[in-house]
Structure formats: C-alpha cells, structure tokens
Image (spheres, rainbow, N blue to C red):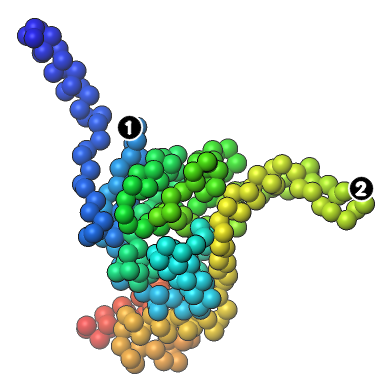
Amino acid sequence: MDTDFTQRLMQVLDRLEPWLPDTPPRVDWTRDVAALWQRHALGGHLVPVPPRDAMSLDDLVGVERQKEALLANTRAFLKGLPANHVLLWGSRGSGKSSMVRALLNSLSDEGLRLIQVDRHDLAGLPVLVEQLRREPARFVVYCDDLSFEGSDDAYKALKSVLDGTLTGPPDNVLLYATSNRRHLLPEHMSDNDASHLTSDGEELHHGDAVEEKISLSDRFGLWLAFHPFNQQSYLDTCQHWVGRLGRSGDWNEEAQLAAVRFATLRGGRSGRCAYQFATDWVGKRRLHEGL
C-alpha cells in the first residue's frame, strides 16, 4: 500500500477516534441485575450498574394495594404468564420510583432484570427491545419520571414499542414507567374544543388532540395510582424510617411533633418527605449524642 495513502488514512482515523463511543463493558445477565441504556449516534449500548440501594418492598408504607398489584404482575411475567405493561402515576414523592427499585431487590433472585432508559433516549427504544429479544433473561425496561411536551415526538417510539408494530415487544420484555401525569402528555383547555355530543345528546366524542393523548397511556394495561398521604400514613412512614435508620427509642412524641412540623414546612406529606425527616431526625440525634 502506498506510504502516503497509509499516513493520510491514519490521520483521518486519529481525527475520528475522539468522536467514537468508548467500548462499553459487557453485560453479564447471569451476574448483573440492572443496566442503563445509553444511546449514541451509532445506536446505543447497555452499561451494567449495581442496584442503587437495599430498598425492600417492606420499606414502602401506605401503598399496600399498589405493591400487591405490581408484585403479582411481575411474578406472572417471570413465570412466562400473561402480564401487563405498567404505568405508575401520581403525586411526587409518593413512592413510584422507590417501588420499582424495591421490586428489583426483591425479585432479582427470581430472574428479574431491570434496564433504565432516560426519556431523552426513547428514540433508541426499538433498537434496545430488538436486542433483548435474543436474550434468555426476562427484562423490565423502565423509564422514570416520564412525561412529554406537546412538541416532543419521543413518545411515538414508546407507542410503537408498546402496541404499534406488527411484532410488538418480545415475550421477555415488559415496559414500566413512572409519571406525575396520568396521560403522560400536557393537557390544555383548547384540547376540548373539538369534543362534541352526538345528535341525541347522549354520547360524548373526544377530538383528535384528546384521543392522541389518551391513546399513549391506554397502551399500559395496568395503571397504579399514587395519591398524597394523609397524616396517619405519613406518620406511619416516618416511624418506619426512624426505626430503620436509628434506634428503638428514636421515635417518640417529640419526634412525632417534629415530623408534623417538617411536613408543614415542606408543604406536603409523602413517602419522600417522611424519609427526609427520618434522615434529619436520626442524624441530628446521633450527632448530639456524639455518635
């Protein structure tokens, strides 16, 4: 080969190399239980990650119905039985994301594998799902805090994978998503302009804008709603986390009053708020006691 041509070729490769993605670590699904999907210009790859924490389903207080439903759906999926894609929606800090993490910690020994996809990487979701079709493991592909703006077309990739292609997702893949919005897309008063009643006044027909927004969330077969805590549920959760993070005597009448004040200052009661109070309360007590 011509020496000059070889040198020029090497110069071109040297310039291209910084633009190429790093060689990703190989995921071993017999060992790794979770991974992140990272999309790039040439497709995407999986990056194995350890579980974030040791959160268990028993740590989630006040959401027993949601836990039971999600656990039953996931166990059916792991056994190869019919199971639904799941949308966990509701108020912020109510335990939606924590429940998915706790589910992995509880069921990874039964074969559950979790892959998290960022909302901005949803365009690569069809590529990921096709890769997983060839794997022997069973996967929940998870998108946290999922919502779309009116001009965002990323939701079309999600719709296609859920129920919009000839093949659909493979039998070894389910999609779980959390969102503060029940219909995932913003809802405006103007969306109702095209809604109308039939001539007999008995039947309401939604306009195209409303139908488009409802059609996305409808592709999730199981909806689990998470509502703000009442005071008793909040205090029960505070008591649980104070006991979990601290000592048996840390939860008392003084702690209960402090928990109420903490929630008042935060402007709401939730599982997240309860955990944050327990962290603050136990940390200050240990610091005051000199550890």
Residue shown at 49%/43% (left/top)?
A: 167
In primary-sequence order, the first of circles 2 and 1 is 1
Q: Residue furthest right?
A: 200
Q: Decide if residue 275 is on the left or right side of residue 221.
A: left
Crowding around mark 1 (Cα neighbors within 10 Å: few <14, some 14 to 19, many 20+) is few
263, above or below 132, in the image: below
Local crowd size for mark 2, using a 10 Å CA cut-off: few (<14), some (14–19), many (≥20): few
Q: Position of residue 226 (x, y in %)?
A: 55, 68
Kind of residue at disc 2: Ser
Instruction: Indicate the quadrant where residue 174 lies.
Output: bottom left
* Residue indicated by mark 1: 42
Q: Which residue is mark 2?
A: 199
Q: CA distance from mark 2 to mark 1?
A: 54 Å
Q: What amino acid is labelled 1 in the image?
A: Leu
- In the image: residue 213, left or right of residue 91: right
Q: Residue at x 57, y 59 (%)?
A: 221
Q: Is residue 8 above or below residue 55?
A: above
**Which of the numbered marks, if any, corresponds to residue 98?**
none
